[in-house]
Image (cartoon, helix red, strand yellow):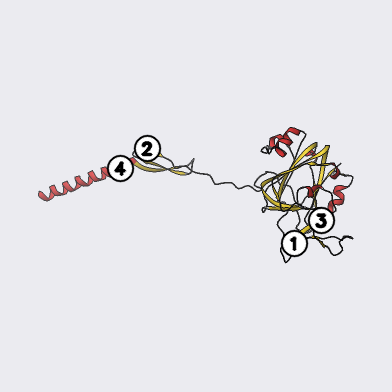
């Protein structure tokens, strides 16, 4: 009889333990949340679902959705690109030139060198001599300087450090429709590669106040106040010396404007070009 009572007592205790576990299980459950693809946990009757952060999408290019094939027009195709077109170099209003984010390496390599229309074979560059003085070297033949070396100043290319982004502002003497433009690389690209512009935009406007607010007063560039004419991304400029690369403005983006800004995006931190020439027609 005592043995029977002991068995009954043990069974009762086991039943109570099982009931207690069942209660705990009811208060702490985990189910699948198919909508969020995450586990929903119930603790003491309160449901909690962890926040699911979607993966970050990396786009290429980083700053624009449309990427044209590059280079648009390699050097060999310039003759066809420029056929029937008129150079606008003489129409550049040099008084309007300014920049934001650009720091010239010296007083001979300012942004004026981009638009001066000087034969690029006569461009200057600098090299320190054994005493640390800057010697100006020419890469082209010069009757007044047959040995190719002299001290002093002279017409220059454009070269210097840049921020990300950097803006070059310039105006024309009158409105003109730019249909193509040509970039000419530096005289020493082969020796010092990595200074070509790599990503850029070209914008135009006829609103002088918008132009001067940025170019003179230093106001922040607002894309909505300008018309985007062109966008180029990723290594379209060759690393050769004095190489010309041409770019055509799409017909649906062309328009007659007097004021422009050339915006540089991604780059290694410095930029160099001998010329930037614009064409109409």
Q: Which mark is residue 148?
A: none
Residue at horizontal 78 percent and vertical 47 percent from the top: 112
Q: Distance between the Cα atoms at labels 1 and 3?
A: 14 Å
Q: Distance between the Cα atoms at labels 2 and 3?
A: 76 Å
Q: Secondary structure at mark 4?
A: helix
> Do tag 4 and tag 1 residues touch (Cβ < 8 Å)?
no
First in residue order: circle 4 vs circle 3: 4
First in residue order: circle 2 vs circle 3: 2
Q: Secondary structure at mark 2?
A: strand
Q: Distance between the Cα atoms at labels 4 and 1?
A: 82 Å
Q: Which residue is mark 3?
A: 123
Would you place residue 214 above or below residue 58 in this image?
Answer: above
> Do tag 1 and tag 2 residues touch (Cβ < 8 Å)?
no
> Do tag 4 and tag 3 residues touch (Cβ < 8 Å)?
no
Q: Which residue is mark 1?
A: 127
Residue at horizontal 22 percent and vertical 47 percent from the top: 14
Q: Which residue is mark 4?
A: 24
Q: Distance between the Cα atoms at labels 1 and 2?
A: 74 Å
Q: Secondary structure at mark 3?
A: loop
**Residue 249 occupies quadrant:** top right
x, y percent for residue 143:
89, 60
Which quadrant does the C terminus fall into?
top right
Q: Secondary structure at mark 1?
A: strand
x, y percent for residue 172:
81, 39
Q: Is residue 225 visible?
A: yes
Q: Which residue is mark 2?
A: 46
């Amino acid at each position: 009889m005592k043995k029977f009572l002991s068995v009954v007592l043990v069974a009762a205790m086991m039943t109570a333990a099982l009931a207690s576990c069942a209660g705990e299980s009811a208060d702490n459950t985990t189910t699948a949340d198919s909508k969020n693809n995450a586990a929903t946990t119930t603790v003491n009757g309160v449901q909690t679902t962890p926040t699911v952060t979607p993966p970050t999408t990396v786009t290429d290019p980083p700053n624009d959705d449309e990427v044209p094939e590059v280079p648009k027009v390699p050097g060999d195709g310039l003759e066809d690109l420029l056929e029937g077109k008129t150079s606008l170099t003489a129409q550049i209003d040099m008084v309007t030139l300014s920049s934001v984010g650009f720091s010239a390496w010296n007083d001979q390599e300012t942004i004026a060198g981009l638009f001066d229309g000087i034969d690029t074979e006569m461009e200057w560059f600098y090299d320190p001599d054994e005493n640390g003085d800057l010697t100006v070297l020419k890469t082209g033949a010069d009757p007044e300087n047959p040995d190719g070396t002299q001290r002093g100043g002279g017409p220059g290319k454009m070269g210097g450090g840049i921020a990300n982004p950097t803006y070059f502002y310039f105006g024309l003497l009158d409105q003109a429709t730019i249909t193509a433009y040509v970039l000419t690389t530096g005289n020493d690209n082969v020796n010092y590669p990595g200074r070509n512009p790599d990503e850029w935009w070209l914008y135009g406007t006829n609103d002088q106040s918008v132009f001067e607010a940025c170019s003179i007063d230093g106001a922040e560039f607002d894309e909505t106040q300008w018309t985007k004419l062109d966008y180029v991304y990723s290594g379209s400029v060759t690393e050769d010396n004095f190489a010309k690369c041409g770019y055509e403005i799409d017909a649906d983006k062309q328009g007659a404007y007097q004021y422009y800004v050339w915006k540089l995006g991604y780059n290694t931190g410095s930029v160099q070009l001998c010329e930037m020439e614009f064409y109409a027609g």
